[in-house]
Each structure stands twice: as structure tokens, then as C-alpha cells.
Image (cartoon, helix red, strand yellow):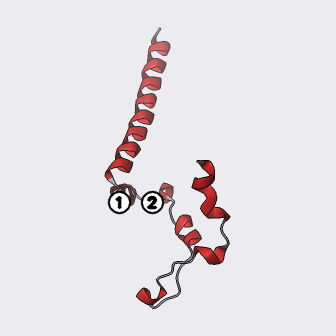
Amino acid sequence: MGFVKWSLFLLPVQNLYSSNREDTGRSPAPVVELFNDVNSFDKSLMEQMAMVEQLDKKEKTAFYAVLDAFLGKKKMKDALSNILTNV
């Protein structure tokens, strides 16, 4: 499974170009550039949410499940920390 996921990065760069040059009239951008542009950490909250909204329903559900798990973990850690400091 890991090989399939990362096999795209093993292809030669010339194979990563889009084949629809006639559609745009421009030189196609390599797929590698597309992956480099996806970095939501430095984006504003609105830009991040717009990126999340582009996902399909199953991916959004998984994203929010992970987010909820991290937020729940933080709340639990904070609550336990408060209890231990008040003892």
C-alpha cells in the first residue's frame, strides 16, 4: 500500500506533465509543482476551510474525525492537568 501511495514520486519528471496542453494553450505545469503548492499551515483560516470544503464527503468526514480526536485529546489533557494542580 505504501508503494502505491508514493509510486508517483518515483516517476521521471517528464512523465508528470499534464497531457491537456491544447486546452489551456500554455505549457503544462508538472504535477510535482501541484503537490508543492498544497501547504495549508501558512494559509488563513478561511483559505484552510475552503481547501477542506473541496474534499469529497468521505474525506471531510475523516478530516473532521481526526480534528475532533486531537481537540478531545487536548481538552482531556488540560482537564487532567487542572485536576492534578488543584490536588
Q: Residue furthest top?
A: 87
Amino acid at dot 2: Lys
Amino acid at dot 1: Gln
At x 39% / y 59%, what residue is drawn?
51
On the rendered structure, is 32 left or right of 50? right
Crowding around mark 2 (Cα neighbors within 10 Å: few <14, some 14 to 19, many 20+) is few
Q: Which mark is residue 83?
A: none
Determine which quarter of the picture holds residue 74: top left
The local secondary structure at tag 2 comes to: loop
Number of the front mark, 1 or 2: 1
Q: Residue 68 or 13: which is nearer the viewer? A: 13
At x 45% / y 35%, what residue is drawn?
70
Q: Is residue 47 above or below residue 13?
A: above
Determine which quarter of the picture holds residue 63: top left
Q: Residue 57 or 15: which is nearer the viewer? A: 15
Q: How many marks?
A: 2
Q: Earlier in the sequence, mark 1 or mark 2?
A: 2
> Residue 77 at what x, y percent from top left?
47, 24
> Residue 26 at what x, y percent from top left?
49, 89
Distance between the alpha carbons at the discs numbered 1 and 2: 15 Å
Q: Is residue 8 above or below residue 23?
A: above
> Residue 22 at what x, y percent from top left?
45, 89
At x 59% / y 69%, what residue is drawn?
32
On the rendered structure, is 35 left or right of 66? right
> Residue 87 at what x, y percent from top left?
47, 8
Q: Which mark is residue 43?
A: 2
Crowding around mark 1 (Cα neighbors within 10 Å: few <14, some 14 to 19, many 20+) is few
Q: Residue 84 or 64: which is nearer the viewer? A: 64
Residue at the disc numbered 1? 54
The local secondary structure at tag 1 comes to: loop
At x 45% / y 91%, what residue is drawn?
25
